[in-house]
Image (cartoon, grey):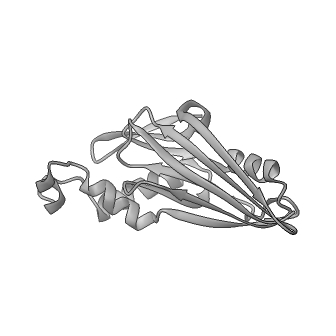
Amino acid sequence: MTRRIASDGRPVELDAAWKTNVAGEDTRMAEGAGWRSATLYLWLHTRQRRAIVALTDRIRRAVRESGVREGFVLVSAMHISAAVYVNDHETGIMEDMMAMLDRLAPYRADYRHHRTGEDNADAHLKSLLLHHQVIVPVTDGDLDLGPWQQVFYAEFDGQRRKRVLIKVLGMA
């Protein structure tokens, strides 16, 4: 269920479904002597400038489609004002995370980056705090996550088309 909160006075769409934010997909496959690689580019276009998009189900499907049984999947936000992270799929922790990020990297007019004409320095800093990618093990053809772990895309400067890379590598 999508829920909206405010972050630095701006709306954030929490738990936004990837289906409603995906603008396109592109897949490439490769294989050799016993190994496989699948690369999926997800193009996201969030409705809000800030959003948290649940990606676990789509990543899980990419692993199944790849045929990889043992290996890992890399999930990477390919933009410097977004992040990918692993945590609990619970709105309270999402709200707490956004509050923490706002304390550590609040929206302010006096960032040096804004001298370039941009107004998104806080988005760059929030991305640095969460990081831009995660690696998740693949075991027996599925994501090997802890009992509460899910993978999320955090958008801090959206409402435009951005790309997420999902790369599955391993043994068939």
Q: Quadrant of the N terminus?
A: top right
- Residue at the image position 59 percent from the left and 47 percent from the top: 41
Which quadrant, please, contains the C terminus? bottom right
- Is 172 above or below relative to 156? below
Q: Quadrant of residue 121?
A: bottom left
Residue 68 in percent (x, y) is at 82, 60
Quarter occupied by residue 151: bottom right
42 relative position to 136: left or right: left
x, y (%) of residue 107? 23, 53
Residue at x 45%, y 44% (from the top left corner) = 162
Identify which residue, 91 or 52, lies in the foreground: 52
Residue farthest along the front direction in this orientation: 32
In the displayed structure, does residue 125 sit left or right of residue 34? Answer: left
Give x and y (percent) for residue 134: 58, 65
Q: Which of 30 and 81 is in front in this view?
A: 30
Q: Is 3 placed above or below 115 here?
A: above
- Left-right relation of 94 to 50: right
Q: In this view, does 52 lie above or below 138?
A: above
Instruction: Pick the residue in front: 14 or 138.
Output: 138
Left or right position of 72 against 140? left
Question: What's the residue at 36%, 60% (across, down)?
Answer: 126
